[in-house]
C-alpha cells in the first residue's frame, strides 16, 4: 500500500483536500544535483543505462520538493534505440539517430522488441526506483506515443518542419500505418514490462500529435494510442493511463474516447473550459505555462492559484506544468509553484 496515493485517487476522480502535484521533467538540468550525477555518468545515455543513477536522479526532486509522485528517469527514445537505430545525444544537441527510416523496406525490416531483454536497463531502473521510494508515493512509468517516436525515427532526430514524416503520411499512408502499428505493439510490451517491474501509473507523451490535422491525428496518433490504452486496460486493469498530446486541446473529446484515466493539458488550453468539456469523464493534468517559472515568485504563486481555482472545486485535478521544466529555471521558483499547491485546500 502506498502511504501517499493522492495521484491514484485523483485519477479515479475521488474528492481530495487538495490536488496532487508532480512536474513534467521534474528530474533534469535545472537541478544542480542532477548536473553533478550526469557529469559522473559521462553522458545522458550512459546515465539512462545505469539503474542506480536513474534512481538517484528520479529521487532528487522528491527529496527537494515533497512531490506527490515520482517519474521513472529514462527517455522516450529508448524504444527506437532498442529497434536498432543507434541513439546518441551530443553535448548541447538534441537526440540523433545513426540510422533513420527512409524507405518502406526500412519499415518492413524493423524488429518487434522484447523489452525485458533490449530495454532491461529501463526495467532495472523501475525496480530500483520503486524500491528506493519504499511505497511513499507512486512511480509513473512512461513511453513516447507511436507518432512521436515515428517522427524521431523518420527525421533522424528533432525537427522543426517534420517534412520527412509528413512526406510519409501523405505519400505512403499504408506504410505509415504499418510503422505506427508496430510501434504501438512495442510500446505496449514496454509499458507492460514497466508495470511488472513496479510502475503504478503510465503516461504516454505525444509531444508531436499537435502538428497534425485532425484527420491525420486520428489515424496516425490517436488510433495507435487507443490500441495502447485498450491493451493496458486488458492486461493491467488497475493501472491508470494518462495521455498527453501537446497541442491537442481541440481534441480532448477524441482523447477521452480512448478510455484513458487522465489527460495532460498543455498551457494553451483553458483548464476551466476543459473541465466543462470532459471533466466528468477523466482526470485532467496540468497546466501551468513552464515559462511562468521565469516570473517573480508572487506571479508564479498567482498563476498557480489561478489554475487551481479554475478547476472550480471539482474532483480529478492533477497539478502539473503544461510541458516540461526548462533547463534555465531556478529550483527556488519551482518550489514556489509546488508549495502553493501543497498549501492549497478545496472549499
Ligand atoms: O523527469 C522526467 O520527466 C523523467 C525523464 C524524462 C526525460 N525525457 C529525461 C531527459 C522524460 C519523461 C522525457 C520525455 C521525453 N524525451 C519527451 C516527451 C516529453 C516532452 O518533453 O515533450 C521527448 C520529446 C524526449 C526526447 C528528448 N530527450 C529530447 C528532444 C531531448 C533533448 C532536448 C532536451 O530537452 O534536453 C532529450 C534529452 C533529455 N531527456 C534530458 C532529460 C533530463 C536532457 C539530457 C541532458 O541531461 O542533457
Image: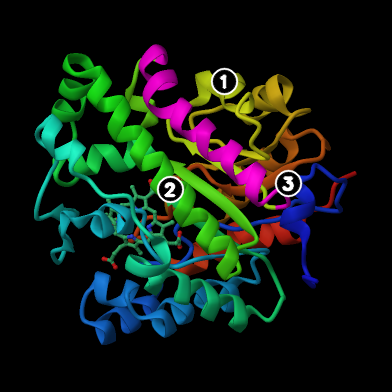
Q: In the rendered structure, which disc, 1 or 2, sits on the residue that comes first in sequence?
A: 2
Read off the magenta span.
Answer: 214-238
> Residue 285: percent from the left, percent from the top?
62, 42
Q: Is residue 133 visible?
A: yes
The N terminus lies in quadrant: bottom right
- Of all residues, the one furthest to the top in this rendering is 215
Q: In percent of the image, x 15 and y 21: which residue is there?
A: 167
Residue to which mark 1 is pinned: 254
Q: Position of residue 253 (x, y in %)?
A: 61, 20
Q: CA distance from mark 1 to mark 2?
A: 20 Å
Q: Front-most of 150 and 318?
A: 150
The residue where tag 3 is placed is: 11
Vertical comparison of 205 with 191: above or below: above
Could you tell me which residue is drawn at 50 percent across and 54 percent down?
Answer: 191
Query: Callout 1: 10 Å neighbours few (<14), some, many (20+)?
Result: some
Does the stretch in magenta take in 224? Answer: yes
Q: Tag 1, which secondary structure?
A: helix
Residue 187's disc is 2
Q: Earlier in the sequence, mark 2 or mark 3?
A: 3
Amino acid at each position: 500500500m502506498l502511504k501517499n496515493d493522492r495521484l491514484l485517487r485523483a485519477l479515479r476522480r475521488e474528492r481530495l483536500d487538495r490536488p496532487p502535484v508532480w512536474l513534467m521533467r521534474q528530474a533534469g538540468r535545472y537541478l544542480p544535483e542532477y548536473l553533478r550525477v550526469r557529469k559522473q555518468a559521462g553522458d545522458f545515455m550512459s546515465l539512462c543505462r545505469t539503474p542506480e543513477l536513474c534512481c538517484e536522479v528520479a529521487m532528487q526532486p522528491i527529496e527537494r520538493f515533497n512531490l506527490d509522485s515520482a517519474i521513472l528517469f529514462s527517455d522516450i527514445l529508448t524504444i527506437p534505440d532498442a529497434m536498432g537505430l543507434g541513439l546518441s545525444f551530443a553535448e548541447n544537441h538534441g537526440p540523433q539517430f545513426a540510422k533513420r527510416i527512409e524507405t518502406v523496406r526500412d519499415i518492413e525490416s524493423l524488429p518487434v522488441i522484447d523489452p525485458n531483454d533490449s530495454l532491461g536497463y529501463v526495467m532495472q531502473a523501475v525496480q530500483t526506483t520503486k524500491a528506493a521510494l519504499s511505497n511513499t508515493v507512486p512511480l509513473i512509468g512512461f513511453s513516447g506515443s507511436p507518432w512521436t517516436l515515428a517522427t524521431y525515427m523518420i527525421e533522424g532526430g528533432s525537427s522543426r518542419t517534420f517534412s520527412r514524416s509528413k512526406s510519409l503520411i501523405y505519400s505512403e499512408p499504408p506504410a505509415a500505418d504499418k510503422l505506427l502499428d508496430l510501434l504501438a505493439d512495442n510500446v505496449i510490451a514496454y509499458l507492460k514490462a514497466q508495470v511488472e517491474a513496479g510502475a503504478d501509473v503510465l503516461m504516454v507523451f505525444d509531444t508531436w500529435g499537435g502538428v497534425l490535422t485532425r484527420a491525420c491525428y486520428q489515424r496516425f496518433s490517436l488510433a495507435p494510442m487507443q490500441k495502447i490504452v485498450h491493451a493496458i486496460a486488458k492486461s493491467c486493469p488497475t493501472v491508470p493511463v494518462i495521455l498527453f498530446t501537446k497541442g491537442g486541446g481541440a481534441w480532448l473529446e477524441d482523447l477521452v474516447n480512448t478510455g484513458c484515466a487522465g489527460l495532460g493539458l498543455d498551457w494553451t488550453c483553458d483548464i476551466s473550459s476543459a473541465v466543462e468539456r470532459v471533466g466528468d469523464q477523466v482526470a485532467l493534468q496540468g497546466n501551468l505555462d513552464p515559462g511562468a517559472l521565469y516570473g517573480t515568485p508572487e506571479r508564479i504563486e498567482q498563476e498557480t492559484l489561478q489554475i487551481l481555482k479554475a478547476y472550480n472545486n471539482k474532483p480529478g485535478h492533477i497539478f502539473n506544468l503544461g510541458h516540461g521544466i526548462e533547463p534555465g529555471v531556478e529550483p527556488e521558483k519551482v518550489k514556489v509553484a509546488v508549495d502553493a499547491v501543497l498549501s492549497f485546500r478545496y472549499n
